[in-house]
Image: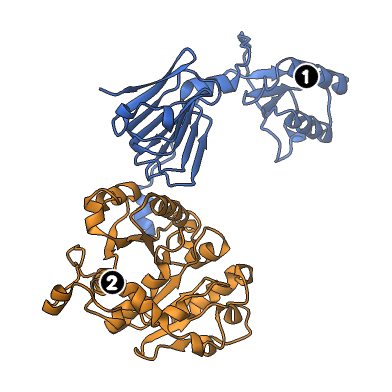
Amino acid sequence: MDATQQAVRQQVRMRGRSYVAFVFSPVVPIVSWLADIDATLTRSPGFFTGKPVVLDLAAVDLSQAAIAHLVGSLGERDIRILGIEGVDEAKLGADMPPLLTGGRSCVVTQVEPHVPQAKTKAAKSPSLLLESPVRSGQSIVFAEGDVTVLGSVGSGAEIVAGGSIHVYGTLRGRAMAGINGNSAARIFCQKIEAELLAIDGYYQTAEEIDAALRNRPAQAWLDGEMLKITPLN
Amino acid sequence: MAKVLVVTSGKGGVGKTTSTAALGAALAQLGQSVVVIDFDVGLRNLDLVMGAERRVVFDLINVVQGVAKLPQALIRDKRLENLWLLPASQTRDKDALTDEGVKRVIGDLKTKFDWILCDSPAGIERGATLAMRYADEAIIVTNPEVSSVRDSDRIIGMLDSKTARAERGERVEKHLLITRYDAARAARGEMLSIDDILEILATPLLGIVPESQDVLRASNIGCPVTLNNADSAPARAYIDAVRRLMGESVDMTVPVERRGLMDRLLRRRAA
């Protein structure tokens, strides 16, 4: 069995490829050079995070222990060293980044670090899907976005959402949409028997909801400072 | 494989204890070995409905706390030899129940019986949550009125979140038992209809027990209604429900009183 497996096993295919990396060239004293790095990081936190960085030690003469300490200090600042150049290979221990040679200089475009939260928000608008009925006494709070319920919302249950609320069943409980000041949020339901509807703090109780709307598909939306409830089709 | 059922409702006075006794007796009448447990510590009633109140020596709390052994506390029914009762304590309160103790008692009972029926107290506090804690299935007792239906909805939500099964990611199978149903009043719109209740609770129906004098009469003499008068309308409803629990398919009807000629002539019966 082993012999046949070995017979069909192919050689691992390898390809060469070159990439652009940041090159750090520390100067003595190392302590003040690290202070310069810290100053850069205060201006743009996380600037080097996740970026490939190569350490060029040609300008300094460091012992093996000093190199290890320098790599450790950069690691504490979230700077990961991809490789080291300009140093005798004998000075690099087994647990150190590998020695690199034959690097060529090129222009590095300075891109300001983007704000990560802004990107994730744009990438996906979060929503919560509930596949079972929401029972009396249950409270579903989802400030991040829309809530969709495949089923009914029982009398005495409540749904609180940062975005819109969609109920594919009868809405008998309370629904509060747009709690973070989102006045564009709406509430949709297959059948309206709600105890209370609210959008961005403007609310109506069961008593104020037009009886003609009861038991029909409806939506609630905000028209200026007026909460309007209109039938769907 | 033993099945643990909780009979629950949220609201009080809807017929949990009566239904536990009737369903337990009906299961035993069909040859199953059954134990009914009263979880209403401090306000026990199941012993009265079962007619065993004068034979209580040890109770659930004694067993939970290790003061008595399980066989010492179990009371065998005088009419059905495969029907047993584990009574509650009347002098203690629900705080005397512990999660560990209840788990151990139910684990022990599972090795001895086919069916374990837990009669839950009203409310949503410790007694009710521990009664449902280790249940495999639940019978939700509901009256055709809005307050009872909403409380049942609340209890269904708790069955889906607070039970040991729910916490393991499994589900507790739920059955709806509608009691005190009056077809004439429902037809006049004075009561919620069966369809309304099912629409609100979205839970499969186990049975419809009609409002009947037979239920109170049976409770007063300490005999489950299915034993006292197996031919009465509520007894037939409970027996049908039990057959559905055992997996038979029985048509869903609301049993009506069978009146003899003399009854029809006289219109009234002495209680």
Is disc 1 surrounded by few (<14), some (14 to 19) or many (20+) residues within 10 Å? some
The picture's colour for chain A is blue
Q: Position of residue B15 (x, y in %)?
A: 39, 66
Q: Secondary structure at mark 1?
A: helix
- Does B86 sit left or right of A25 as displayed? left
Residue occupying the far left of the picture: B261
Q: Are marks 2 and 1 in contact (CB under 8 Å)?
A: no
**Badge number at residue B238:** 2
Residue position marked by numbered label 1 in the rendering:
A37
Tell me the amino acid under the disc marked 2: Tyr
Question: Which residue is located at x 33 percent, y 47 percent?
Answer: B200
Q: Nearer the viewer, mark 2 or mark 1?
A: 2
Q: Position of residue B6 (x, y in %)?
A: 42, 67
The chain ID associated with circle 2 is B
The answer to which quarter of the image holds residue A85 is top right
Q: Position of residue B9 (x, y in %)?
A: 43, 60
Question: Is residue B112 visible in the rendered structure shown here?
Answer: no
Question: Which residue is located at x 30 percent, y 78 percent?
Answer: B271
The chain ID associated with circle 1 is A
- Does A127 sit left or right of A218 as displayed? right
The answer to which quarter of the image holds residue A89 is top right
The picture's colour for chain B is orange
Question: Which residue is located at x 36 percent, y 58 percent?
Answer: B143
